[in-house]
Amino acid sequence: MTAKFTVDGNNTKIIFEYETTTEIIQAIVEDASHYLWKEVIDSDVTFEDLTNQEKLDLVNEHVKLVIMNLANTYKSIKTQEDARTLEEENKYNL
């Protein structure tokens, strides 16, 4: 796996790239998208009707959500820790 940033002016793209045999990649995407479809998606379309691109799009969207959830969780924890530190420094005193 490789990961990289590509900067273009004010915009930055992150790229995650995975490489292995076609058989393994297809199996991973198939199983991951099947799990997401079965557990997350509510649709009249059957899994078997999805194209390979649609399956990959499902996995990609989930990976994006995982990254965003990690970042947002850390941001929340950091804010709580900062607030706790500030309050500890400014405790009431009689």
Image (tube, rainbow, N blue to C red):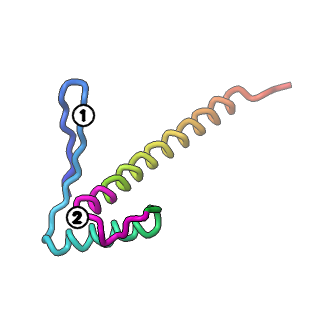
> Any magenta on residue 56?
yes
Left or right, residue 73 beside residue 30:
right
Q: Which residue is mark 2?
A: 52
Q: Earlier in the sequence, mark 1 or mark 2?
A: 1
Q: Extreme right residue here?
A: 94
The chief SS type of the magenta part is helix
Q: Residues within 10 Å of mark 2 (few under 14, many from 20)?
A: some
Q: Residue at x 40, y 66 (%)?
A: 37
The amino acid marked with disc number 2 is Asn
* Range of residues picked out in magenta: 44-58
The quadrant where residue 33 appears: bottom left
Residue 24: image x %, image y %? Answer: 20, 73
The amino acid marked with disc number 1 is Thr
The quadrant where residue 49 appears: bottom left
Q: Which residue is mark 1?
A: 12
In front: 40, or 7? 40
Q: Is residue 6 positioned above or below 52 on the image?
A: above
Q: Residue at x 55, y 43 (%)?
A: 77
Residue 38: image x %, image y %? Answer: 43, 70
